[in-house]
Amino acid sequence: MYFNMKNLAVAFLLFLAGVQTVFADKGKGMADGTGYYLPRTELRFTIKIEKSSYTPGDFAIYAEKYMKMSDVKTAPEVTYRILDFDIASVGERDTSKYYVLPADSKYNIQSVRLDDNGVLLAVNAEPRTIETPKPFKPSPKQALPDPRDYMNEDVLSAGSIAKMAELCALEICDIRESKSMLSKGEADFMPKDGEQLRIMLRNLDIQENALMQLFSGVTERDTMETVISFVPDKAVDKQLLFRFSKWMGVTDVDDLGGVPYYISVEDKRVLPLVHEDLFSKKKAKDNGGLYVNIPGKIKVTLSKGNEQWAAYELYAAQFGRTEALDEGLFGKKMFTSVVLNPVTGNLESIDISEFKK
């Protein structure tokens, strides 16, 4: 492909513009200081769901006639049910809380640690280790036996499905009779010891279960996980969070075929205890200083229709306030290390050392 010099110049200017945009998003240049964000608290609801897939057996229509089994389904069916439900809180950057730590020689700020999204984690210290959730991995499914491996020659050579069903039913009855005779010690060929007896009974169970699949069908179960994120920014009463259907699993909130699950958020108007002498007494500028969150406590209630399902209390950054730490803590005669909570942005630890003269 041919580029002239004018096109190359334009491409280079566009590249520089992109680089400048990235740095502007991460923070101001080193001459001005280090830009950072404080977090807001996001709720993540993890729903573990069991998916059951039913496949009818080849002889399902004969289940009642030969095996006295009623209500055997003759059509495939897929259903879902909720196994478990968990809530976790995570921190994400709050774009309304962007600040800059000044690069000024009068401040003893030696290191600033941010996460990948520019959220402040620590100053003059190592941040708290953030445990990342392990990716969901469903349990491996056990392979089901093939019923044809346990059919005798008479069944395999039968000329119709109806005859095969009849002969399979007789074979199942013979297996059950053999199990009964072994258990009573009345079989013609009794095993020598208890271990051999257990092996023989287990093999007969496998044969019976494999052949019974032809009448009762097979239900395979898979476990899956769905994560729903929600950022509370105000108190709400029964806001629709998601819908769940026995036939479709988690559905869109607009799908009326699913049962509604609601979320309510109550502002408890409770703040954690803080040392007020750590905060600046003067009005700090919007673009300078070290800010931290003082989160507020909220109560989160989940309801299935009109029935309360679960309730949690936790601290959320956006329900509290933001304060600037006293600039004197970072003076040249002090060494102050600060570690922030990555979820709420509040002071998790602060260590202050004063240099001796």
Image (cartoon, rainbow, N blue to C red):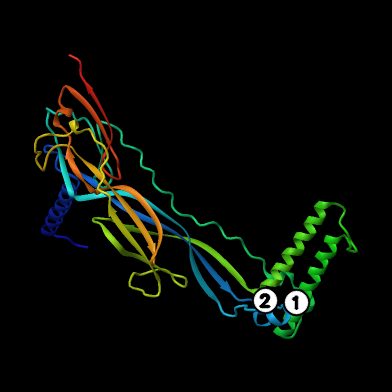
The residue pinned by badge 1 equals 169
**Rendering coords of residue 231 (x, y %):** 28, 56
At label 1, counting other C-alpha atoms closer than 10 Å, the crowd grade (few under 14, some 14-19, many 20 or more) is many
Height in image: 95 above or below 169?
Answer: above
Q: Which mark is residue 215?
A: 2
Identify which amino acid the numbered label 2 is placed on. Answer: Phe
**Rendering coords of residue 186 (x, y %):** 89, 62
Distance between mark 2 and mark 1 Cα atoms: 9 Å
Whether label 2 touches label 1, CB < 8 Å: yes
Identify which amino acid the numbered label 1 is placed on. Answer: Ala
Front residue (pair 14, 176): 176
**Rendering coords of residue 208 (x, y %):** 73, 68
At label 2, counting other C-alpha atoms closer than 10 Å, the crowd grade (few under 14, some 14-19, many 20 or more) is many
Q: Residue furthest right?
A: 188
Quarter that holds the N terminus = bottom left
Quarter that holds the C terminus = top left
Any part of residue 35 in sight: no
Any part of residue 128 in sight: yes
Callout 2: helix, strand or loop? Answer: helix
